[in-house]
Image: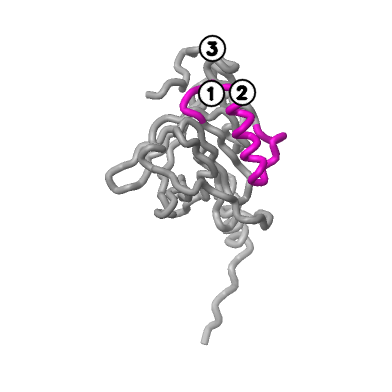
Amino acid sequence: MTRPKPARPFVLRLAGGFVRAACRRVAPAVLAAALGACAGPSLPPIRTAASVDVDRFMGAWYVIGSIPISVEAAAHNAIERYRRDADGTIDTLYTYNDGGCRGPVARHTARGFVLDGGSGAVWGMQFIWPFKADYRIVYVAPDYGATIVGREKRDYLWIMARTPTPGEEIYRDLVARSAAEGYDPALIRRVPQPGGGCPAAAPGDSSGPG
């Protein structure tokens, strides 16, 4: 009986390259490439919001702080928009001005899946079929005016609000809540928004709830 030939080094390198590329590819804001093949330290489970009204969570959120993935490292006027479709999945659009308040507009899309129907806080965010990135609503304010989205690996973080400038006290509280879940506050980047580091309106910018 003919024994199967071992995989050629080129094939092995190609497979390894695919996994590494998958770990780097992102669809921001969501965004974030947490594929099972991506290595990471063992951490205690991150706490999530006890209950999230997913329909109420829909709409536009201004990203006011983040531990960003590389592609959004210079984001200004960043907004994450959610729309729940008839099949229950969540159409996600992330827009921002890249590199400055009047920089070119970047747009990234993904599709969210609510994985924990009990709390509504644990999602999978799909930017490359069939993989779903870890995406967890760590906190949402009682009035749904602010939220924190994180991940078990504590690698990426998005602090968001319904308005671009919710106030310094609210921002500091959200940073403190993130730190309590294992995030390093020194890594959190304050994202410039209209009235908070950027002009009220920039030509062609991503700002606004529309």
Secondary structure of the residue carrying tag 3 is loop
Task: Give the labeled residue for mark 2.
Answer: 168
Q: Which residue is mark 3?
A: 199
Mark 3 or mark 2, earlier in chain: 2
Q: Nearer the viewer, residue 7 or 205?
A: 205
**Does the image show residue 26?**
no
Q: Residue furthest right?
A: 186
Residue 41 at x, y percent in the picture: 68, 55
Instruction: Identify which amino acid the numbered label 3 is placed on.
Output: Pro
Please name the residue that numbered disc 1 is placed on.
166
Secondary structure beneath dot 2 equals helix
The span shown in magenta is 161-188
Q: Residue 47: x percent and y percent?
A: 57, 50
Q: Is residue 187 left or right of residue 58?
A: right
Report the side of 98 relative to 83 (left or right): right
Rendered location of residue 123, percent (x, y) = 46, 49
Residue count near mark 2 (Cα–Cα under 10 Å), binned few <14, some 14–19, many ≥20 = few
Q: Is residue 122 above or below residue 107?
A: below
Q: CA distance from mark 1 to mark 2?
A: 7 Å
Q: Are marks 3 and 2 in contact (CB under 8 Å)?
A: no
Label 3, label 2: how many angstroms apart (C-alpha)?
Answer: 18 Å
* Residue occupying the point 59% across, 45% down: 24
Residue 12 visible here: yes
Q: Amino acid at mark 1?
A: Pro
Vertically, is 4 above or below 13? below
